[in-house]
């Protein structure tokens, strides 16, 4: 027995960190009180053809009949926690595993024998669901560990295989994951949980044979700060700006949150942002030079990501500005029936290029009247070049001294 006992100690220390003591007081909660074991209870019994019947019996003396394979009795209506939370100073929620127990007592036979055992199932919440910035999902896991118990309160650590597996379904919108438990005491069955956009917590239901409606459990969520952009490239050399959105994922309401925005290249209109009212924030990135731009969010209290945006040479911008100016100058000469010269065509192209750079690079309008634009696109660059090539540029006067 030395080896099984050592194995049990390892199991308890692994599954229940910080709560295993000399007499394992937490596991006492797996045992139904003696006075309750002597009460009559409704026990659901499953026979060899998987038919279900119900009969009353005292739990202490209940025995499976030869044609019965397993049985279960409900001992409550909710999943109960059996460990004690340990919260560090300044920590709102513990980030370690939390151990719960399904409110059911199971009877079954060991495979290949007539030995009857009783066991309970531990539900282990392995920690808060964390946001995966690569998959855009909150991910985590839960575990189920059946532990054999006796009415005397003794824990039997020897691994045993059930003659009939216990079926459980883990259900959360929109997933439904079936679990088959065929071994008691070890190993635990791990279930991966992935959810796209849970808010505050993720509602999970554990469906069993005796409770098809399921036991409700809310899994914890670890909020994360997400910075995102709909584009992966930007016109370089200061030509283009790009809106970046900053969101606190996983919570519905929160206090005003200060975050910092850092960029390896280019400029941000505001290096500090305040997230309030559960709404996303927005900053504007302006390109600088050419190359890779890394933008990241800085906040000590939350995990966050960074995004990569490539600042590319503005070939199309230059081509459209020059072409627009050229065609605008050509139209002006043809309308005035003037002689077409290389000088006039070149001048129109230069006007288009200057007007486009002045407007998108410096915010200065050089075409004689104001225009309202919404960002940068091909038609706007070409149109501004046309206007500049046709009408020419205004003279920007310096202030009188």
Image (tube, helix red, strand yellow):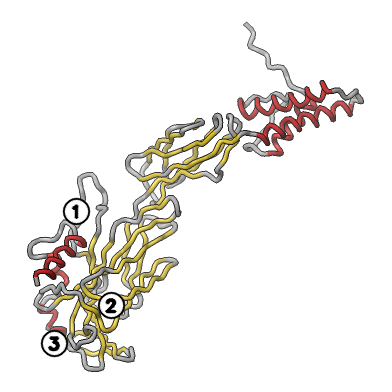
Mark 1 and mark 3 in contact (Cβ < 8 Å)?
Answer: no
Q: Earlier in the sequence, mark 1 or mark 2?
A: 1
Question: Is 8 on the left-hand or right-hand side of 336?
Answer: left
Q: Residue at x 71, y 39 (%)?
A: 379
Please state the total of marks drawn on the protein image: 3
Provide residue 271's location: percent of width, then percent of height. 44, 32
Question: Is 305 on the left-hand or right-hand side of 230?
Answer: left
Residue 168, disc = none
Q: Specify few, some or many for label 2: CA neighbours under 10 Å numbering under 14, 14-19, or 20 or more.
A: some
Residue 61, disc = 3
**How far apart are the two marked residues, 1 and 2, measured between alpha carbons?**
32 Å
Residue where numbered disc 2 is placed: 182
Figure quadrant of residue 332 = top right
Q: Earlier in the sequence, mark 3 or mark 1?
A: 3
Residue where numbered disc 1 is placed: 86
Figure quadrant of residue 97 = bottom left
Q: Residue at x 35, y 69 (%)?
A: 205
Provide residue 186's location: percent of width, then percent of height. 23, 70
Closest to the observer, 298 or 283: 298
Q: Residue furthest left?
A: 22
Q: Specify few, some or many for label 3: CA neighbours under 10 Å numbering under 14, 14-19, or 20 or more.
A: few
Q: Residue furthest bottom?
A: 66
Q: Residue at x 38, y 57 (%)?
A: 139
Which quarter of the figure is the C terminus placed in? Answer: top right
Provide residue 190's location: percent of width, then percent of height. 31, 66
Q: Specify few, some or many for label 1: CA neighbours under 10 Å numbering under 14, 14-19, or 20 or more.
A: some
Helix, strand or loop for disc 3? helix
Q: Residue at x 45, y 46 (%)?
A: 279
Figure quadrant of residue 49 = bottom left
Q: Nearer the viewer, mark 3 or mark 2?
A: 2
Mark 2 and mark 3 in contact (Cβ < 8 Å)?
Answer: no
Q: Is residue 220 above or below residue 107?
A: above
């Amino acid at each position: 027995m030395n080896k099984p006992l050592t194995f049990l100690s390892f199991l308890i220390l692994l599954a229940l960190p910080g709560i295993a003591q000399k007499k394992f007081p937490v596991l006492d909660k797996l045992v139904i009180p003696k006075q309750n074991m002597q009460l009559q209870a409704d026990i659901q019994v499953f026979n060899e053809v998987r038919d279900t019947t119900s009969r009353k019996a005292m739990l202490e003396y209940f025995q499976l009949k030869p044609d019965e394979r397993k049985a279960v009795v409900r001992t409550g209506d909710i999943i109960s926690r059996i460990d004690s939370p340990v919260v560090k100073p300044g920590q709102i929620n513990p980030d370690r595993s939390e151990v719960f127990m399904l409110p059911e007592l199971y009877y079954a036979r060991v495979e290949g024998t007539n030995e009857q055992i009783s066991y309970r199932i531990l539900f282990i919440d392995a920690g808060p669901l964390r946001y995966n910035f690569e998959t855009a999902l909150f991910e985590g896991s839960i575990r189920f560990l059946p532990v054999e118990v006796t009415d005397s309160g003794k824990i039997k650590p020897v691994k045993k295989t059930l003659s009939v597996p216990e079926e459980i379904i883990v259900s959360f919108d929109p997933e439904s994951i079936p679990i088959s438990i065929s071994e008691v005491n070890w190993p635990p069955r791990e279930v991966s949980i992935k959810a796209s956009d849970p808010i505050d917590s993720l509602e999970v239901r554990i469906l069993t044979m005796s409770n098809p409606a399921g036991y409700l459990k809310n899994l914890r969520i670890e909020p994360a700060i997400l910075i995102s952009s709909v584009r992966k490239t930007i016109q370089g050399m200061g030509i283009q700006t790009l809106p970046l959105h900053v969101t606190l994922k996983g919570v519905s309401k929160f206090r005003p949150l200060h975050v910092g925005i850092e960029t390896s290249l280019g400029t941000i209109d505001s290096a500090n942002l305040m997230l309030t009212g559960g709404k996303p924030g927005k900053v504007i990135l302006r390109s600088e030079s050419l190359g890779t731009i890394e933008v990241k969010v800085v906040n000590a209290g939350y995990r966050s990501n960074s995004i990569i945006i490539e600042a590319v040479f503005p070939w199309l911008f230059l081509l459209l500005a020059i072409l627009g100016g050229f065609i605008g100058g050509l139209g002006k000469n043809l309308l005035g029936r003037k002689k077409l010269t290389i000088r006039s065509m070149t001048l129109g192209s230069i006007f288009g290029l200057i007007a486009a750079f002045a407007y998108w690079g410096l915010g200065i309008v050089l075409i004689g009247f104001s225009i309202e634009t919404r960002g940068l696109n091909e038609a706007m660059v070409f149109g501004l070049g046309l206007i500049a090539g046709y009408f020419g540029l205004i003279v920007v006067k310096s202030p009188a001294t």
